[in-house]
Amino acid sequence: MAKVVLLPGDGIGPEILQEAKKVIHAVAKASQAEIDMQEYPIGGGAFDEFGAPLPQHTLEAAQKADAVLLAAVGGPKWDTLPGHQRPEKGLLELRKGLNAYANIRPVRCFSSLVGASTLRAEVVNNVDLVIIRELTGGVYFGEKKRWTEEQRFALDTLIYSEEEVRRIVKVGFETARQRRKHLTSVDKANVLDSSRMWREIVEEMKVDYPDVTVSHMLVDNCAMQLIRNPGQFDVVVTENMFGDILSDEASMLTGSIGMLPSASLGDQAGLYEPIHGSAPDIAGKGIANPCGIILSTAMMFRNSLGLSEYADKIEQAVNEILEEGYRTADLAGNDTDPSKILSTSAMGDRIV
Ligand code: ATP
Ligand code: MG
């Protein structure tokens, strides 16, 4: 029996998770897979009830699960709390507790939504790429120091071990192998030693993946190419900070934050979540777009539950519904037929 831990969180979290649950039930029924779903608290609500944004029993359940599906955490109510009590801290602790070192963000521009992007249709049409970001190493986790006397100095250390690089680059190669077989490794090898080591390791590893073509790209050039010609990318693999910046940049190619899924994978349960936040401004109105979490659910079926056939079906269903002209409010434009603007739950029902 597959064990799935569900984390509704705050804001629109519980509303969109409800729609993901409908999809999981539908897949369980169609595939006859036994899927055990249990809900646990995380985020601001968890802090209010249990005094911690990641209660111990939530972490323990996540560590024992096959997959964790998280909706969203945070909101204005908790903005004045000190750092270690904030809802977002719960998420960081969860990633750490699951040793989730690979953050995977597919960026796909659905052809019926190209108008929603800020870029021209001919640039974003057919964008279908994946950014793989190293999530637990690099400059965010290196030694830090500040000196404040006389003159101010500050230090952040960028350090990677060979093992850390190998395991994330491997995810890059394996992902490329399942897709269009092109891997772009992004670094700053013209100035950084850590990048020169990264590039060396990619070169060593590529002999094991003769079916995958590899190119190296400097991060500044990559930032430009993502806007100039994003269609050239299949899989991009990069270190933590470069990936943080590039994945946010790439998400805007599609113009709709409510559509994009993500996975954070390591050696324990995979953690799946939409890239958007808890959207407190629209919480409780029944208008949130559930597609991001539903597409995250598809990634969960593919990567953690061995049901990739159903992942494909979910992605096809989302595509078909958009093709038919159905929209949640965030996706609606001037040309949208008002009778096709759906609530959160009506969108979930259509996808099911
Ligand atoms: P966080 O810090 O948690 O990432 P944020 O401040 O970056 O949060 P979001 O919560 O992602 O922001 O919201 C940004 C904007 O996008 C808001 O106006 C919100 O209403 C909108 N938004 C986010 N997610 C959705 C969604 N699923 N459906 C519709 N609108 C959304
Ligand atoms: Mg945000």
Image (tube, rainbow, N blue to C red):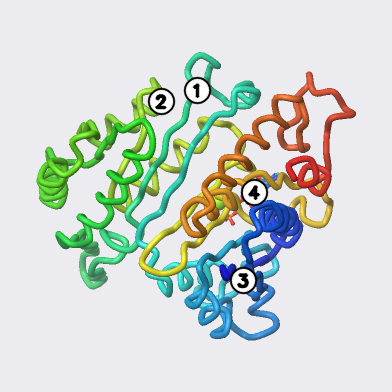
Residues under numbered marks 1 and 3 in contact, where contact means CB atoms less than 8 Å apart: no
Q: Which residue is mark 3?
A: 43
The residue at 66%/44% (across/down) is 291
Any mark on residue 126, and which? 1
The residue at 59%/28% (across/down) is 110
Nearest the viewer among 198 and 82 is 198
Amino acid carrying mark 2 in the image: Pro
Quarter of the figure that contains the C terminus: top right
Mark positioned earlier in the residue sequence (3 or 4)? 3
Q: Which residue is mark 2?
A: 230
Amino acid carrying mark 4 in the image: Ile
Q: Which residue is mark 4?
A: 294
The residue at 52%/65% (across/down) is 67
Residue with the most extreme right position: 339
Look at the numbered disc 2 and say if its residue's Cβ is closer than 8 Å to ligand 2: no
The residue at 41%/23% (across/down) is 231
Circle 2 or circle 4, nearest the eye: 4
Real-space Cα distance between discs 3 and 2?
Answer: 35 Å
Amino acid carrying mark 1 in the image: Asn
Residues under numbered marks 3 and 4 in contact, where contact means CB atoms less than 8 Å apart: no
Real-space Cα distance between discs 2 and 4?
Answer: 24 Å
* Label 2 secondary element: helix
